[in-house]
Image (cartoon, rainbow, N blue to C red):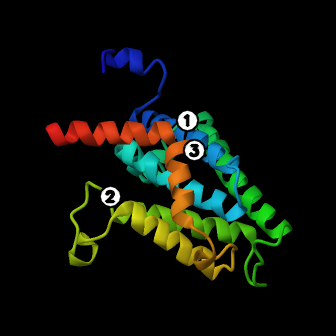
Amino acid sequence: MPYSKGTVYNHFTCKEDLLTGLCNRCVRRLGALFERAFQYDGSSREKMLAVGYGYMLHSQLNPTEFMLVLSAKTPSVREKSTEKRQEEHLILENKLLGGMLEVISSGLANGDLSLQPHLCPAQVAFSLWSMSFGTIALLHETLDRCNVRAEMQLERELVNHSNILLDGLNWKPFTQDHPWHESIQRFKTELFADEVKQLQQKQLMCSYE
């Protein structure tokens, strides 16, 4: 960084507070992608798939920040971060969750989704979040891959796993009833065109290194 340590500590109380600040910046960027997905002109299920796709693009463009979120949640970091920054983190995360809950509520209202009695919208949102995070993290470019994961392609697996989960939740339209490849193409060319272009440029640069 082109700043002295003293300058940095005028804005952050310690390393852990700085880490939480970086995490909040990450969640803010992710929130902007999610907001586009929430406003997508499509079915509630397409919107939810778009959320996962945006999450994947974010992880590829910002791999360090993606993994940083876990570090920022550890007790050793939380205990030393300022209360203001921790509150900001909760507000940002709740905004992400709130948008997902609105999409789920929309699906319930228009009949796309019908939940079994033992499930609530928050559980559905958590299932989708944990599945997406797990898929992306296990196929993260910084991890060595075992034989099972060696042939896995992140985009394909994320879409496949999302559709398996959404089918299991009885969220229409089902996989066999909708041309999902067309939806993915729209995500790439319309919804997240800038991010896809940035990723292509990044991959091109890496290929020359």
Left or right of residue 197: residue 104 = right
Name the one closer to the observer, 176 or 66: 176
Left or right of residue 60: residue 45 = right
> Quadrant where the N terminus lies?
top left
Name the one closer to the observer, 120 or 168: 168
Name the one closer to the observer, 35 or 137: 35
Q: Position of residue 2 (x, y in %)?
A: 30, 15
Q: Position of residue 39 (x, y in %)?
A: 70, 46
Identify which residue is drawn at 27% across, 43% down. 203
Q: Position of residue 147 (x, y in %)?
A: 21, 77
Residue type at mark 2: give it.
His
Residue type at mark 1: give it.
Thr
Helix, strand or loop at mark 2: loop
> In the figure, residue 205 lies in which quadrant?
top left
> Which labelled disc corresponds to residue 184?
none
In this figure, which residue is indicated by the disc labeled 2? 140
How far apart, in angstroms, are the residues tagged by discs 2 and 3?
Answer: 23 Å
